């Protein structure tokens, strides 16, 4: 069972909130973008998947570099920057999407979103696990994975509800209107995740907070 005491730790809670919001916006948006290429622009499922690769394949190239810099500049900073880039990329996609938008116009926001996703993926597990004792890492990792999956499930469900409310499959225009509204919301949720990540305490501040009572006790004893 998941110890609820984990959520008393600010690092654990904010890192998981960031994960929830990240996957909410990312999976909810990809769900519609894959359909956009097929339903509106007439590509096959394979062609649609290949067109999303500049986004989804970016972690192959960026994540190793992000992992190398995570310990130097702080995982929470990389997470905040990554989520910000992801939110900007999603908002950019929603802004330029029309039934006739050339694919070349979407490549750059796809790459930006992919870079943001990579910067988030690399440090998040380390940030979560650093907030618990070594013997609790299995439960903490399982909780993070479950919360991540819940984010994806809720993202698709909520954004699909928005899509059916304001758009639909009747025409290309109605699909794009529903999709862009949903993707804007997804971008906003990811931006909230960036705010949560920005408030994750650094390892240095955590160590200083832990050391403060010890130094105080030494002062009293002296």
Image (cartoon, grey):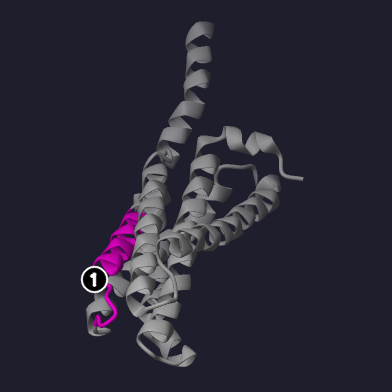
Residue 84 magenta: yes
Where in the figure is residue 46, as x and y percent of width and height?
47, 91
| Residue sitting at x 22%, y 79% | 105
Secondary element under disc 1, as helix, strand or loop, is: helix
Quarter of the image where one finds residue 175: bottom left
Seen in the picture, residue 30 relative to 181 is either above or below; the reply is below
Q: What stretch is highlighted in magenta?
A: 81-101
Where in the figure is residue 89, as x and y percent of width and height?
30, 65
Where in the figure is residue 98, as x and y percent of width and height?
27, 75
| Residue sitting at x 58%, y 49% | 129
User: Could one spot residue 109 in this view of the protein?
Assistant: yes
Q: Classify 10 Å Cα crowding around label 1: few (below 14), some (14-19), many (20 and above).
A: few
Where in the figure is residue 144, as x and y percent of width and height?
60, 53
In this rendered view, identify the residue nearer to me: 216 or 93: 93
In this rendered view, identify the residue nearer to me: 28 or 137: 28
Is residue 193 left or right of 132 when viewed as pictured? Answer: left
Seen in the picture, residue 6 relative to 120 is either above or below; the reply is above
Q: Name the residue under label 1.
A: 96
Q: In which quarter of the image is the N terminus?
A: top right
**Quick one: which residue is furthest to the front in this view?**
170
Is residue 108 left or right of 41 when viewed as pictured? Answer: left
User: Could one spot residue 72 in this view of the protein?
Assistant: no
Seen in the picture, residue 40 relative to 188 is either above or below; the reply is below
| Residue sitting at x 46%, y 27% | 209
Q: How many marks?
A: 1
């Amino acid at each position: 069972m998941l110890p609820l005491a984990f959520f008393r730790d600010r690092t654990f809670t904010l890192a998981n909130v960031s994960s929830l919001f990240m996957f909410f916006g990312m999976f909810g948006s990809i769900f519609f973008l894959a359909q956009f290429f097929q339903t509106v622009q007439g590509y096959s499922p394979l062609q649609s998947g290949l067109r999303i690769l500049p986004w989804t394949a970016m972690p192959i190239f960026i994540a190793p570099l992000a992992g190398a810099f995570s310990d130097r500049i702080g995982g929470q900073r990389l997470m905040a920057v990554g989520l910000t880039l992801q939110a900007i990329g999603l908002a950019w996609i929603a802004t330029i999407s029309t039934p006739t938008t050339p694919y070349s116009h979407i490549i750059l926001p796809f790459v930006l979103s992919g870079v943001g996703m990579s910067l988030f993926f690399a440090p998040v597990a380390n940030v979560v696990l650093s907030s618990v004792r070594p013997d609790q890492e299995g439960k903490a990792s399982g909780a993070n994975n479950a919360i991540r999956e819940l984010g994806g499930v809720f993202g698709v469900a909520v954004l699909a509800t928005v899509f059916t409310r304001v758009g639909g499959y009747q025409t290309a225009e109605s699909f794009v209107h529903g999709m862009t509204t949903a993707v804007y919301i997804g971008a906003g949720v990811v931006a909230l995740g960036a705010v949560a990540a920005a408030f994750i305490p650094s390892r240095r501040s955590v160590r200083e907070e832990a050391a403060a009572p010890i130094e105080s006790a030494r002062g009293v004893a002296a």
